[in-house]
Image (spheres, helix red, strand yellow):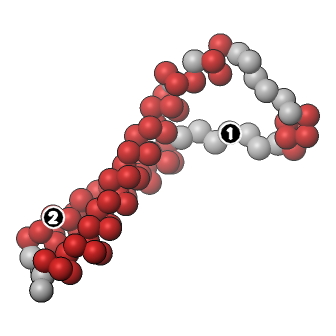
Amino acid sequence: MGVLEIILGSAVLLASVIITVICLMQEQKPQNATAALTGASNDSFYDKNRGRTKEARLRKVTFWFSIVFFVLILFMDIVMPLLTK
């Protein structure tokens, strides 16, 4: 195993742990049948400013770490075998 493989493997492991922890930190939205059938919506101050909340920041961080994870996996799967030939 080369140094690059160890570094990329560590980065993938770190990204996967961070994604797991961030996903566990997010709140689950209630999925009750009454709200689905009646089309209930909350037009509260909280819902209108959802982009500035802790949940929104966690969602954005999860998105970006997922992109990094995906790119690292693709790099390790496609480019690394070409470099080791």
Which quarter of the figure has residue 79?
Answer: bottom left
- Residue at mark 2: 7
SS class, disc 2 = helix
Q: How many marks?
A: 2
Is residue 50 placed above or below 7 in the rendered structure? Answer: above
SS class, disc 1 = loop
Figure quadrant of the C terminus:
bottom left
Image coords of residue 24 (percent x, y): 51, 48
User: Would you say residue 12 is visible in this rendering?
Assistant: no
Assess disc 2: are there few (<14), some (14-19) or many (≥20) residues with their C-alpha within 10 Å of its C-alpha: few
* Mark 1 vs mark 2, CA separation in Å: 37 Å
Assess disc 1: are there few (<14), some (14-19) or many (≥20) residues with their C-alpha within 10 Å of its C-alpha: few
Does the residue at mark 1 contact the one at mark 2 (Cβ under 8 Å)? no
Single out the residue that lies furthest toward the bottom.
85
Q: Is residue 64 left or right of residue 8?
A: right
Residue at left offset 59%, top offset 39%: 27
Residue at left offset 29%, top offset 75%: 77
Q: Is residue 84 left or right of residue 30?
A: left
Q: Nearer the viewer, residue 2 or 24?
A: 2
Residue type, label 2: Ile
Figure quadrant of the N terminus:
bottom left
Residue type, label 1: Lys
Image coords of residue 67 (percent x, y): 38, 52
Is residue 43 placed above or below 75 in the rendered structure? Answer: above
Q: Which mark is residue 29?
A: 1
Q: Is residue 67 left or right of residue 9?
A: right
Is residue 9 placed above or below 84 in the rendered structure? Answer: above
Residue at left offset 79%, top offset 27%: 41
The earlier-in-sequence mark between 1 and 2 is: 2
Image coords of residue 49 (percent x, y): 57, 18
Residue at left offset 29%, top offset 57%: 14
